[in-house]
Every structure is written in structure tokens, then in C-alpha cells.
Amino acid sequence: MLSPRGVTRARQLLPLRLWPRRSCGDGSIMASMQTTGRRVEVWFPKRLQKELLALQNDPPPGMTLNEKSVQNSITQWIVDMEGAPGTLYEGEKFQLLFKFSSRYPFDSPQVMFTGENIPVHPHVYSNGHICLSILTEDWSPALSVQSVCLSIISMLSSCKEKRRPPDNSFYVRTCNKNPKKTKWWYHDNSV
């Protein structure tokens, strides 16, 4: 189902090729993608494609886009992250999962840590959910994937003690899988 406003998921993609591109006049871009031997035309929101290219070409320090993650869907990215030098997380490797709805950038992306290594931090739950205001109520369309990445790096870098949030066990047992469905209470800006 192709739609000028939606994003279609194509399976078994070869490396993401977004050329030739054509502007569609409605803020989206039509691009040809190659799937197992055949070409498929898919609509991409212009903003999301622009941010993908920016993250590939000029990622924040310590972050790289996991290229395999965008081969299957442009609406779900994995960003590999390395702890900043001189911090409690120096040398540690993490992965951030970004999921974008069709309303992005007016609706914030769903962002959480994923994989084997979830950082131990007062604002990061053991299931990967992140308590950070810009991911929910303080989101603005002026923010970007890069600004979210920088905020998360800054949050980890300013941490003075590795510990889980005090309600970690209860939250992980009772929360929704989507961290955006949590009504967060932002009360601690010191870490």
C-alpha cells in the first residue's frame, strides 16, 4: 500500500539506494529501492530521509548509524553508541532504537536502549526505557535525531553514579512496551 503520506515497509532490501529521487510536491520524496532483484518505488517523508542522510554523513561523536537497521525499514533505526571518554561509560557500547511514526516530526520518535548492554543510569530503566523530557512532552518538531542523540550522550556523560531508578523493578514489571505511553514525572535534572 503506497501512500504519499505513509511509509511502506519493503522486506529483504539490498543496501538502501535512494537514487534517483523525485520530489513529490507534498513534502515527501519518491525513491526507487532495489529489493531481491526488482525495483520498488516507495514514499519517504522528506524530513526523515534528510535526517537519515545527516546521521550517515555527520553523526554525533561516538555515534554511528547501524546500516543494516535501515535496510528493512526507514522508520526503524538502530544507532550504535560508545560511552564518551572521561565519563563513567567510557569504552562501553550501547544501542539506541529509534522508531518513527507517520506523524514524525510532529510526533516524537520512540527512543530506547536495546540489545545486550543497557546503561546503568538513574534515568534509564533495565528494559531500555529512557526518562528524558524531550522524548515526550518537551518534544518539538525543531528537534532532530542528532539532537536526541546529543541529549542522551550529555545525560550519560553528566552521571556521577551508576545506579538504576529507584522504581526500576516495579516499572519494568508493569510498563507498556512503548515508553511514549508512560506518563513520566520529571523531577531530577542533576543527572
Image (cartoon, grey):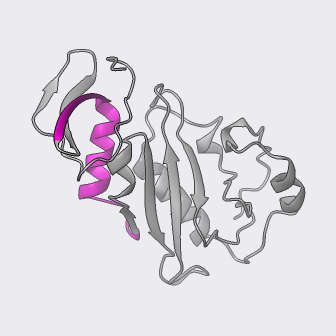
Pick the front one: 80 or 57 = 80
Q: Is residue 183 left or right of residue 68?
A: right
**From this viewpoint, which residue is outermost toward the left?**
20
Residue 89 position within the rendered picture, expressed as x and y whole percent measured from the top left: 58, 79
Task: State whether residue 63 is above or below residue 43.
Answer: below
Number of labelled discs?
0
For the C terminus, which image quadrant? bottom right
> Would you say residue 45 sits in the magenta stretch?
yes
Residue 182, image x, y percentages: 75, 40
Position of 135 with respect to 164 (left or right) is left
On screen, 41 above or below 72? above
Give the position of the N terminus as an image quadrant: top left
Relative placement, left or right, of 137 versus 55 is right
Of residues 6 and 88, the one drawn nearer to the viewer in this rendering: 6
Residue 5: percent from left, percent from top: 37, 19
Residue at screen point 74% across, 60% down: 125
In-front residue for pair 79/131: 79
Residue range highlighted in magenta: 38-62
> Residue 186 in the image: x percent, y percent?
76, 47
